[in-house]
Image: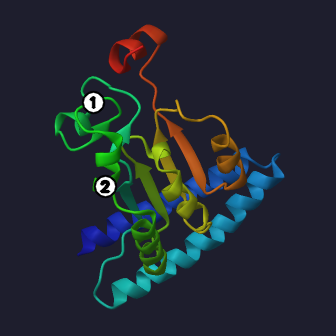
Amino acid sequence: MKNDLTLERYLNDGVASLIRDALKATWHNPRASAFWARYSLAAAKAEARRQKVEGCGEHAPLFLIASIASQCNLHCVGCYDRTNHIGAHIGAHISAASASRMEMSAQDWRRIFDQAEKLGVSAILLAGGEPLTRMDVIEEACRRPSILFPVFTNGTLMEGAVPRVFDAHRNLVPIVSLEGDENFTDARRGP
């Protein structure tokens, strides 16, 4: 039990450090600084909720990883989702319509996000497939400014209204995966 508490403290301290660093890095940007200040308060409240849950004998995690999409617009070599034949890649062995029937609905994700918020989860990492194929779920994440949502994306769908959604909802943080230079990326992901 002591190791769990040490790990929990380590993770909580890591979040506090992230917030401090983000505040320092964004001091010149009032909107970003205001978000990180609000998130700092929300993270402290979430930690108190987690401690309350822990006091009742249950464990509440600091963060979750949510694979919200099985579809992807790329065909990367070595993709774990593709190798297990569960994920759907547009133009691959499963149609986009079949993939969307296998995925949880935005309403299901709303309930999960609500439960996570009540437990004191501070961050939910959104992954896929390609999470930007599920803007309905991204919109549910927008509605929870007290939770940080890093969105692991290949970046190819960051166009049109998508960048404006991220700009308007600072709790969404795009994490763009890069393979290296153009040749290496094309060799892994396709041209």
**Which quadrant of the rendered structure holds the C terminus?**
top left
Whether residue 174 is situated above or below residue 179 in the rendered picture? below
| Residue topped by disc 1 | 92
Mark 2 is on which residue type?
A: Arg
**Identity of the residue furthest to the bottom in this view:** 56
Label 1 and label 2: CA atoms lie apart by 16 Å
Callout 2: 10 Å neighbours few (<14), some, many (20+)? Answer: few
Name the residue at 83% across, 53% down: 30
Q: Quick one: label 1 or label 2, which is nearer the N terminus?
A: 1
Q: Nearer the viewer, residue 177 or 83?
A: 83
Mark 1 is on which residue type?
A: Ala
- Give the number of marks: 2
Name the residue at 41% across, 22% down: 179
Mark 2, secondary structure of its residue: helix
| Residue topped by disc 2 | 101
Whether residue 138 is situated above or below residue 91 in the rendered picture? below
